[in-house]
């Protein structure tokens, strides 16, 4: 949205069918939009860890940003404080903090490549792979590890589905990466799946 005001308006009007529990404005101000015990319409269609209806089992936080610029330091500070409070009260582990692009692969791209996931991970508020691990690039291994970590393989032709999954993974963990699936992609997702599996292997 163009401004905090336009975001607040859109998130408050029933006809848009979108809402969230919290909105963090450009100046770091935190707006409480929906009571945490109530369902908000923030996640939309998607799933994580093999379970859908994410709206009914999550707390949605929106951060005011165009999606193309770095998030302000005051916003990240406000988000860290808010996450610490929510995670403590609801016993949410770091791996339970995800973005829209994680649960809606190929459909959503926010919070975008400028969002500082690594900063959150260093504070224990999210997760980050040990990027020293490298594995020979293998599409099957990448997909299996991504699903074990929590991602869903999107519908569509195999190449398109893999491309969308790789894009979603890179958007969060390797936003600088380009080109086809590589050794570092596979190593990073295998590391995440081994340390924070959302789904156990059968």
Image: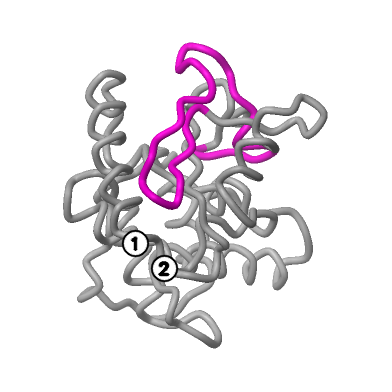
Task: Say which quadrant the C terminus sits in.
Answer: top left
**The residue tagged with tag 2: helix, strand or loop?**
loop
Q: Position of residue 156 (x, y in %)?
A: 78, 60
- As displayed, is residue 25 above or below residue 177? above
Mark closer to the chain start, 1 or 2: 2
Rendered location of residue 42, percent (x, y): 60, 34
Colouring of the image: one colour
Along the viewing direction, whichever of 8 and 94 lies nearer the viewer: 8
Q: Which image quadrant is residue 56 in? A: top right
**Position above or below: 73 against 99:** below
Residue 98 image position (x, y, % from top left): 43, 45
32 over 149 or under it: above or below:
above
Residue matched to label 1: 116
Of the numbered discs in the image, which one, if any, rests on residue 70?
2
The magenta-colored residue range is 21-49
Q: Nearer the viewer, residue 96 or 28?
A: 28
């Amino acid at each position: 949205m163009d401004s905090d005001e336009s975001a607040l308006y859109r998130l408050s009007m029933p006809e848009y069918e979108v809402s969230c529990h919290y909105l963090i404005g450009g100046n770091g101000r935190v707006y409480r939009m929906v009571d945490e015990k109530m369902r908000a319409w923030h996640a939309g269609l998607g799933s994580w860890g093999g379970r859908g209806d994410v709206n009914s089992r999550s707390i949605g936080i929106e951060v005011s940003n165009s999606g193309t610029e770095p998030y302000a330091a005051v916003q990240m500070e406000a988000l860290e404080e808010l996450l610490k409070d929510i995670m403590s009260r609801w016993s949410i582990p770091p791996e339970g903090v995800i973005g829209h692009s994680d649960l809606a692969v190929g459909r959503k791209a926010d919070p975008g490549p400028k969002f500082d996931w690594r900063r959150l991970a260093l504070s224990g508020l999210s997760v980050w792979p040990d990027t020293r691990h490298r594995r020979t690039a293998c599409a099957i291994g990448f997909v299996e590890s991504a699903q074990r970590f929590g991602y869903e393989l999107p519908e569509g032709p195999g190449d398109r589905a893999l491309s969308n999954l790789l894009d979603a993974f890179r958007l969060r963990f390797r936003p600088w990466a380009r080109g086809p699936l590589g050794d570092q992609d596979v190593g990073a997702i295998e590391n995440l799946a081994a340390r924070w599996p959302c789904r156990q292997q059968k």
